[in-house]
Every structure is written in structure tokens, then in C-alpha cells.
Amino acid sequence: MRIYIDADAFPNVIKDVLIRASVRLNVPLCFVANKPMRFEGPANISIIQVPEGPDVADNHIAEFVQPGDLVITADIPLADRVVTRGAFALDPRGKLYTQENIKNSLAMRGLFKELRDGGMMSGGPAAFGKLDRQTFANRLDSFLTRHLKTENGKT
């Protein structure tokens, strides 16, 4: 199992949560971004810089993700692509996307986009706060604990 992070629009405040989980559980962690990132740390943490352009990082993640991997992204179309490939996606606010809920989430995204484009709705999500960080940390821990037990045959 590997964790990919869609790092182009990633809340930096959860980076330490991911790094601690990666180190504690020895799960490879890969930040994918189209901008330079610096990080010095454990060998199981890597950074892939892709060329600039729309969806280049998303396309890289979608191409390399394997069944059972986890992708951290707020991008619902990317979440749909990775879930379709048998992986999982976790929103930085703690929502886990799976085969059972991704199509509904994608449909809701489309509806909200239409409402915003039509001027019937404005604004975006609330600012990322401490509760979001804690919700993300809890969901990540729960997912990794359950997934790694299953992966190791300890269901």
C-alpha cells in the first residue's frame, strides 16, 4: 500500500499528520505536485514534481495508483478516477471516498457547480480549521489500521 497526496491544493496543516502516520506504520508516502516542494525525512517519503498544467498531477496519480492505495485529495473527479481503479480517496476534511459513495459525491459536485454557475449559490467551503484536522487524523488512522490489518491477513 502507498499513500499519494495531491499536493497542488493541499492544506499544509495536515502534512505532519500524514508524515507521522507514514513513519509509524512504515507506509510509503508520495507527494505529487507541479510546484517545487522541499522535504527531508524518512526514505519512505518521496516528492514527485510533474510539469505545470491543468490536471497533470492528477493524471500522474491516476496512472500510478494501484488497488488498495490511498489518495489524499479534495478533487472529487480525481477521487472518482482512483476509486474506479480499486484505490481509496480521503478528503483533507476526513471524507473517505469508496465505490459505495463516489458517484453520489460526483453528482453532488456537479449540482453545486451548476448552482454556482447559475448564480443561485455563492462561496465555497469554510476555512480549514482544527476540527477538520482532527477529523482527518481520526479517519486516516481508522482507515490505515483497518486496511493494514486486512492487507496482512488479520481481518
Image (tube, rainbow, N blue to C red):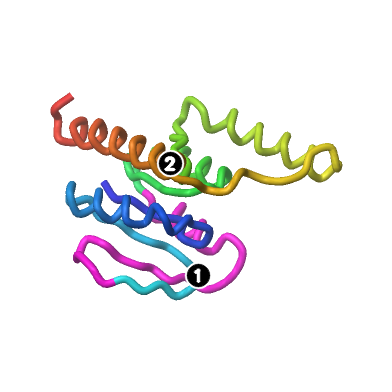
- Amino acid type at image mark 1: Asn
Instruction: Name which residue lies at 58% across and 45% down.
Output: 77
Depicted 14 relative to depicted 111: above or below: below
Instruction: Name which residue lies at 19% across and 66% down.
Output: 43
Depicted 139 relative to depicted 70: above or below: above
**Front one among 114 and 140:** 140
Say which quarter of the image contains residue 13.
bottom left
Badge 1 crowding class, 10 Å Cα cut-off, few under 14, some 14 to 19, many 20 or more, is: some
Q: Compute the Cα span from label 2 to label 1.
A: 20 Å
Side of 76 where 132 appears, left or right = left
Please state, as top left, top right, bottom left or bottom right, where the C terminus lies in the image. Answer: top left
SS class of the residue under badge 1? loop
Badge 2 crowding class, 10 Å Cα cut-off, few under 14, some 14 to 19, many 20 or more, is: many
Instruction: Name which residue lies at 46% across and 52% down.
Output: 62
- Amino acid type at image mark 2: Leu
Depicted 92 relative to depicted 142: above or below: below
Instruction: Name which residue lies at 45% across and 39% down.
Output: 131
Side of 18 where 131 appears, left or right = right
Q: Earlier in the sequence, mark 2 or mark 1?
A: 1
**Front one among 131 and 67:** 131
Q: Position of residue 69 (x, y in %)?
A: 33, 45
The residue indicated by pointer 1 is 34
Q: Is residue 87 visible?
A: no
Q: Is residue 114 magenta?
A: no
Asked if disc 2 and disc 1 are in contact, CB closer than 8 Å, the reply is: no
Residue segment shown in magenta: 40-65
Depicted 9 relative to depicted 111: above or below: below
Residue 148 is tagged as none
The residue indicated by pointer 2 is 90
Q: Position of residue 79 (x, y in %)?
A: 50, 43
